Image (cartoon, rainbow, N blue to C red):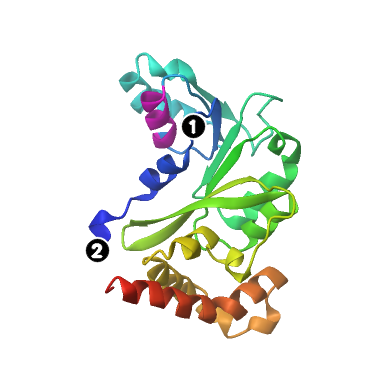
Amino acid sequence: MHKTMPGRFEALFRLVPPNVRCLTDIGYDHGKIMTRLVRTYKQMQTIGVEIQPEAADRFMRYEAPNLPEEQQRINLRTGDGLHPIKPGEADALLIAGVGEMTTDRILDEGKNRLEEMTCMIFMPSHAVVHLRHTLKKHGWITDAEIIAYERRRYYLAVRARKALMNESEDWTWRYAPTLFAQKDPMLYAYLMQVKEHFRDRLQHIDKQPPAMRDYCLGLDEAIEKAREFAAEEGL
């Protein structure tokens, strides 16, 4: 069952539209996403941002030699969040492997740059809870999601776009709206993993922040609905 599911990097790569002009990857780590993007899309530019200065040295030592022509389309910068990005430089944003609260702070501090983005792609280190509220606050809405599976864990990759006027939403927006719409059979396994991760929080729902409280209160309903999708596929 899991052999057919994409890994983390594959899921993120699939969510990047091929017509992106320049993607900013915050917390690029080894630069695997940027490397694949510039190899695949000859017109695409990338900017990698890492707070640790040694990240750029590591990339230049181990990855750059394998990119004799493409490395000129990878621009590495040291800094925090979107602060190193100049106005008009990038039209897409990727943040993966970063906690939700850090991601929320990056978006809040870089809100002026968000106006220039055509899409934003995320894969938090755990469940997607607070991020959806932050996106909503800035006028963005989920338009695509992919569940990845790697090292016995499920990950949710989310792509957001600017919301249109009067777009409707139902209770599924807190969990995985596009996957519920698609009746994704792997949604059940992912949500069960989330429930296990939030086991302690579920025992103290009244003490949770509003976004987490609402998420936990509706989690069982979401799981039961997702269970139907899995059952239809015999999973």
Q: Residue at x 50, y 28 (%)?
A: 19
Magenta residues, as a range? 32-41
Residue 102: x, y in percent?
Answer: 63, 51
Q: Quadrant of residue 23?
A: top right
Which residue is labeled 2 in the image?
A: 1
Against 77, residue 203 (above or below) is: below
Q: Which of the 4 image quarters holds residue 230? A: bottom left
For disc 2, the neighbor class at 10 Å (few under 14, some 14 to 19, many from 20) is few
> Please, what is the three-letter code of the amino acid marked with disc 2?
Met
Q: Is residue 117 above or below residue 124?
A: above
In the rendered view, does 218 fall on the left or right side of 228? right
**Pick the front one: 99 or 190:** 190
Quadrant assignment for the N terminus: bottom left
Residue occupied by mark 1: 54
Q: Position of residue 51 (x, y in %)?
A: 58, 37
Please report the residue visible at 74 percent of the width from the left and 50 percent of the height from the top. Answer: 165
